[in-house]
Amino acid sequence: MFYRNIKCVHKYLTIVIASKYLEMEEQQNVKFGLKSINEESCRFANDSILNGNIEVSCLQYKYFTVTEVFPKEDTIVVHASLRYFSSKNNYFELEMSLEFFVNNLRGVVSYNQDSREITFSPNLIPTFLNTTCGTVRGILAEKVKGKSIERFPLPLLPLAMLEKNNNISVRD
């Protein structure tokens, strides 16, 4: 347990390490942080496939996210799915979700039901997508230890790609 607060000021975000969770404040004085990490499913191919020789040239991965916004609960949930595969085999699949709280979510998210247009504060969703991707990378590293697929970590993904492969919905 921490007994002090440490503030690190970056261009637009202030990160506060507090006693129970990481809390961030944007310049608009909106606080948000990580509430929970949930592994929804983890599936491996059979041992003979996983411990065999995996051809680098054939290995592919698919990573995408689905973001659900719950304005009444001041919560955003990012569901992530990662799959390693080749044309012949599925090697590994991981699905998880990260739940974030945002105090006064309606202050940083606007939603027009008629046009179905969602507008966010500029740093909010990119922060959540980066946090989710890093968490998935860490869980992947732990899950594949000792298997031949551990030589292939999830690469660093550009933010533009994370945003492009993210579907967003609002749940009222």
Image (cartoon, rainbow, N blue to C red):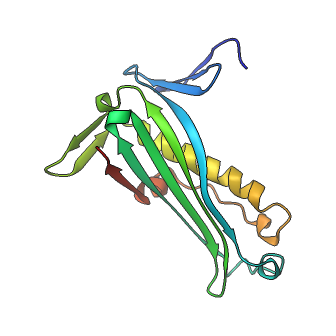
- Left or right of 68? Residue 82 is right
* Residue at the far bottom in the pictured view: 88
Name the residue rendered at 36%, 52% in the picture.
168
Left or right: 46, with 105 as reference point = right
Say which residue appears at 82% left-offset and 71% top-offset: 148
Which residue shows up at 49% across the image and 37% down it?
Answer: 100
Q: Which residue occupies the foreground of this view, 14 or 52?
A: 52
Looking at the rendering, which quadrant does residue 85 occupy? bottom right
Above or below, 145 against 87 in this view is above
- The answer to whether residue 121 is visible is no
Corner quadrant of residue 27: top left
Which quarter shows the N terminus? top right
Measured as percent of width and height from the top left, residue 99 is found at 51, 41
Residue at figure coordinates x 60%, y 69% from the top left: 83
Q: Relative to residue 97, is residue 60 depicted above or below? A: below
Q: Position of residue 54 (x, y in %)?
A: 77, 79
Quarter that holds the C terminus: top left
- Report whether residue 90 is seen: yes
Q: Residue furthest top?
A: 4
Q: Residue furthest right?
A: 146
The x, y position of residue 22, in whole percent, is 59, 27
Where does the image place residue 95, in percent across and percent down from the top left? 58, 60
